[in-house]
Image (cartoon, coloured by chain):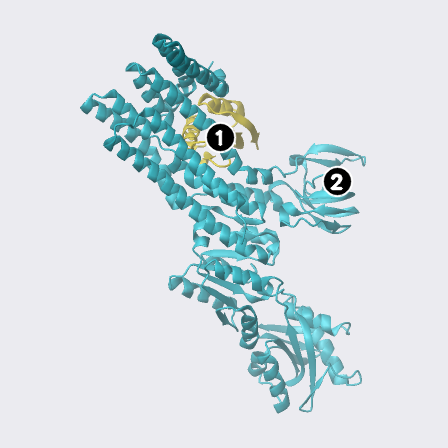
Amino acid sequence: MQRFIFRHKNSLMVVNIVFIVIGFFSHWVLRNDTLFDIAMMIASVVGVLPIALQAYQALRLKIVSIDVLVTVAVTGAFIIRNFEESAIVIFLFLFGAFLEQRTLNKTRSAIKALTEMAPESALRQTGDGEYEEVDVDEVEPGDILLVKTGAKIPVDGTVIFGEGSVNEAGITGESVPVEKEEGLKVFAGTILENGTIRVRADRVGEDTTFGKIIELVEEAQDAKSEAERFIDRFSRYYTPAVLLAAFVVYLISRNVELSITILVLGCPGALVIGVPVSNVAGIGNGARHGILLKGSEVIHAFSRTDTMVFDKTGTLTQGNPAVARSLHCRNGTVQPGLGPEEDLELASARSYLAAVEAESDHPLARAVLRELGEVPARQVENTRVVRGAGVVASVDGRQVAVGNLALMEKEEIALSEEAARSIGELERSGSSLVLTAVDGQLLFIMEVRDQIRPGVEEELRRLKRLGVKNLVMLSGDNQGTVDVVAAELGLTEVHGNMLPEDKSAFVKKLKEEGRTVTFVGDGINDSPSLALADIGIAMGSGTDVAIETSEVVLMNSDFRRLAHALGLAKATSRNMRQNIVIALGVVLFLFFSLILSDWMNMSIGMLMHEGSILAVILNGMRLLRFKKR
Amino acid sequence: MKSANIQLETLTCPSCMQKIEAALKSLTGVDKESVSVSFNTSKAKLKFDDDALNIGDIETAITRVGYEVKKSTVK
């Protein structure tokens, strides 16, 4: 019986409406007030059933829910034989809930669309080489899966056979298909647009990048800020307080009409629903644009950002530097190129340099290796890394130092007048330098340049327009290099020669000055700064790392999503405040109308109450359409 | 101990969560600390002792307070 009532809540609402219509028809057309009362009575009883049942179940669990308030109010109206009021209040309450369910589904639609992209089944190879369809939960790492045209790739894995083009929009936000062939990685939740591939599962289920994204988004939409937790706690005591207040008013005034009106006016609604609605719509918009915001706390902090600190390499620049110019030094003179083949000293120095750089995964080292090309391999011993300066090692019993000017000074390597002049010029032009010395003699000067990422300048301008006052760049490179980049990009402040711990100390200092700091870095050696800043954004190291370490995740490390992310955070935060104002405004308005006017009654109260809930939901829905300007 | 992940009908009022949470916590065999009902995802998550009760009992507890269960997974 109870189940039947709950399941047919909407049908009961229709019956309620029909009898209300019959009632008014009897009243206005037939002029039959007995029929009017009977119709309204039936409408009330039918409509109140699901509400009263829920109220009863709530009371059994010692919770005074909104259903309890409404049921008591309707019963009161019934007792004073105001059947019209009771019927209409019930109708408004049921119809309000009906509309709220529909509109709430809309606000959550963006996130739902994302979660529905999760793969459900897979074609798994069996022992005899055939393929059987299995639930995606049954797939284990190491399984061989077949993916056909148009199918979702069920796991994170490696292509072992075949080729095809894959739409990776779900992971990267990029809708241009990517070609995949043997040996390349594919990701769960992406779609094979054409071709057929066989994939070895590397990671399955929640461990896949897509699984992590879903988990994060699901957590984010319900992650609560301190203010929301306060509202929750408040509403727990609020409803019983309203019930008590109505009872006290009745005891004093003996006015049932007034008491039940208080019950209806006191229903908490827009206040508790307003903030979560903005939150889910804002996060949903982000998810559709390749931006993950980790909850409302993050949204608030991010929206207040006044200082944005960027790491240079890999964030503002491509992090893929190349050697722009090479010089070699012989007998105090500096000449272009890496020296002639016949010069045996320079030839062996080249292979020493290659051997030392081969041991490092520093971007500069890779640039140098690319420049050197094929050289004979050498054994490297006693490698000593001088942080922020370079490397010293012995090769073939000779002392090799590779690094910047600071390293040369530290190792007391003498520079000829001409060499010192060349180095000075290059430093001022904003390049990074890789200097090579063998047994205390400077032999090579290499100038390495890093390209600025496309679109960075425009994006920084947008950030400024969004109210970020300070755009700061920190870098381990020399001051000359960072000054050049800063001038090109219009940054407000730059600091070179910074070690990771200098960067985090700098972030700490900014925070102590009372600024709200967002740090954008590569997520590997910048992790202390990322953790310390109010908001950390990891870039340039894959979505995986970013998801774990960042408060705001930009898919595919796309710098061009940064302004949208900030704009969206601001809009969402503003939307939440608007909803709180709407909710409180309505409550105050109702309260004062009750005291100061004589037109306020139960039905109007309920209408305003449901209306304000719909108003905050519709306001929240605006966020789904937010676009960056 | 098993953990259940239950997809509910769209929750429209945050006070629904209170009710569902209380209903789940009142069951013997459910780890009270683990119960969480989230509004936007309309999901309930909890851990329970599968010797004391099964997922059917948990679903019944939710439908009894007036909310539909769409789908549930137990691990």
Up the image or down, A200 lies above or below B27; here it is: below
Question: Tag 2: residue type?
Answer: Val
Q: Secondary structure at mark 1?
A: helix
The answer to whether residue A378 of the structure is visible from this angle is no
What percent of the width, then of the height, locates residue B39?
A: 46, 35
What number is the disc on residue A101?
Answer: 1
Residue at the image position 61 percent from the left and 67 percent from the top: A452
What percent of the width, then of the height, locates residue B13?
A: 43, 32
What number is the disc on residue A147?
Answer: 2
Q: Are dots 2 and 1 on a single chain?
A: yes
What percent of the width, then of the height, locates residue A312?
A: 56, 66
The answer to whether residue A562 of the structure is visible from this angle is yes
Estimate how packed mark 1 is, as few (under 14), some (14 to 19) or many (20 or more) residues with alpha carbons within 10 Å.
some
Tell me which chain appears cyan: A
What number is the disc on residue A286?
Answer: none
Left or right: residue A554 versus residue A199 is left
Estimate how packed mark 2 is, as few (under 14), some (14 to 19) or many (20 or more) residues with alpha carbons within 10 Å.
many
Residue at the image position 42 percent from the left and 64 percent from the top: A510
Instruction: Depth check: give the residue in front, A149 or A454.
Output: A454
Up the image or down, A481 lies above or below A23; here it is: below
Residue at the image position 46 percent from the left and 61 percent from the top: A468
Question: Tag 1: residue type?
Answer: Gln
Instruction: Depth check: give the residue in front, A35 or B4.
Output: A35
Specify the farthest residue to the left.
A252
Up the image or down, A104 lies above or below A448; here it is: above
Which shade of the palette goes to chain B? yellow
Left or right: residue B40 versus residue A453 is left
